Amino acid sequence: MQNALRLAAVDRAARRAGLTPGLTLADARARVPGLAVIDHDPAADAAFLEEVADDCDRWTPLVALDTPEGVPDGLILDITGCAHLFGGEAALRTRLLTHLQRHGASAFAVIAGTPDAARALARSGQGGVGRSGVVPPGGEAQAVAGLPVARLGVSAEIVTGLSRAGLKTIGDLAARPGTPLAARFGRELLTRLERTLGREDVRLVPRRPLPECIAERRFAEPIARTADIEATLARLVDDLALMLEARAMGGRAFEACFFRTDGAVRRLKIETARPLRDGVALARLWHERIEALADPLDPGFGFDLVRLGVIRAEPLSPAQVSLDGRAVEEEEVAALVDRLGVRLGRERVLRFLQRDTHDPDRASALVPAGGVPLPAPSPPPEALVRPLTLFDPPQPVEALAEVPDGPPLRFRWRRVVHEVARAEGPERLAAEWWRRPEAAPTRDYYRVENREGRRFWLFRAGLYEREAQGEAGPPRWFLHGLFP
């Protein structure tokens, strides 16, 4: 029996025939000879539930997956502050169920003061709630009193122990003192009971982070043209700009959600190089984002809801334009970075960042141009000025020095001999032992100038008679950079 095939889910017709989840397939076919079955696909179920959850964002941004046994098979929506937009709680519930049914999904929905009470009632087919499906304020204890204790979501061992003690319903359990129950079955049982009775609330963990602020437009007649979509985004941008200005904030990341009439949801995101609330600039970025789509927005039968939210915001104070115009230049560069990032992708627009290290190979790095700037180290003193052009890797040269550890007198690079007229150095750099476990040789850097006035940056890898030669051989000379 342990390896027997069992029913994972049944439809309403199967329930009317007496079939329930967990029943073996052999018993089910014995009761209903013409039973039609398909293989259970948990991945497809999870993907479908995610699509339904995305569509439920149209009612509230606080949508969480319900996983009572570790497997998501339901949704919990926090509609606090949202119900009045749809004519009240009962009207919102009716519209939600009608919307799901229109797209081929049937569901039980109950509105209660706590998530646990709503879950217990919905999984019991609404239990003691009337046709409205709404529990009146403070009526959770009465509504769930007749439900079996299994609806608390506790383990099967606890349910069996409670049943043997004669406590079969939540009402029976609520009538008993809590201290003996906690001593016998653990504190978790009392916590679940308090939440299901509506005496203790718990915060939901939404699937998506809650935006800083949201603006949306609903349409009685769905829109499908790109021009209408961009015009709607422009109006939403203006609404968000007013909200951000009132908070002295600017947006760094924005998300546009397009809800289709068939339940599908399309999402687009943009990120900016600096806090932004300029409506014209944001509208231009959204135009660039839509134009750059490799897979254009598919409106289907149209979008009946467009929502724009600020995912991340930062303080933004009015900037004073400097007399030298530097502030204007910085704004223009930031605007260019934003447009390139929207069209090419934020990870493809890079800038150089100076690192606080003496190792020339690690002195600079490429980072996203629109990212948060890291603190730049103080510039090196004049004696340590280094060339802007470096070779990677350094190019080997043949050099002749007057003394083994002295500056070069002449060197050969690319089959051309350069006579050294002047030399500065050495600048001795040892390897960063905490980054390089292997013993890298010490480098002595020299700034040299040949007789034609060309300047080079050379180094000798290794010290004569002071570092073990090993497999590296004697010290060698390399050309690392060129001065302008």
Image: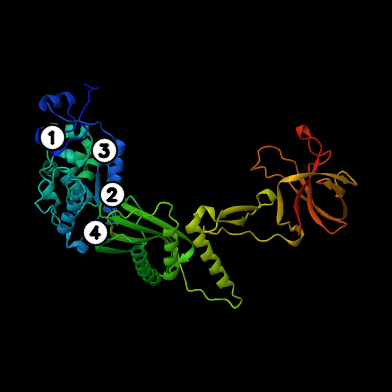
The residue wearing badge 2 is 53
Give the CA separation, mark 1 to mark 4.
Answer: 36 Å
Q: Pointers 3 and 2 in contact (CB under 8 A)?
A: no
Q: Quadrant of residue 423?
A: bottom right
Amino acid marked by disc 3: Glu
Name the N-terminal-most of marks 2 and 4. Answer: 2
SS for callout 2: helix
> Which quarter of the rendered picture does the C terminus lie within?
bottom right
Callout 3: few (<14), some (14-19), or many (20+) C-alpha neighbours within 10 Å?
A: few
Name the N-terminal-most of marks 4 and 3. Answer: 3
Amino acid marked by disc 4: Thr
The residue wearing badge 3 is 69
Residue 43 x %, y %: 31, 37
Q: Residue at x 22, y 23 (%)?
A: 4
Callout 4: few (<14), some (14-19), or many (20+) C-alpha neighbours within 10 Å?
A: few
Name the N-terminal-most of marks 3 and 2. Answer: 2
- List the single residue furthest toward the right: 402
Name the N-terminal-most of marks 1 and 3. Answer: 1
Q: Is residue 326 above or below residue 302?
A: below
Q: Nearer the viewer, mark 2 or mark 4?
A: 2
> Which quarter of the rendered picture does the N terminus lie within?
top left
SS for callout 4: loop
The residue wearing badge 1 is 14
Q: Pointers 4 and 3 in contact (CB under 8 A)?
A: no
Please say whether residue 84 is visible from this viewpoint.
Answer: yes
Give the CA separation, mark 4 to mark 3.
Answer: 26 Å
SS for callout 3: loop
Q: Which mark is residue 355?
A: none
Looking at the image, residue 132 sits to the left or right of residue 245; the answer is: left
The residue wearing badge 4 is 80
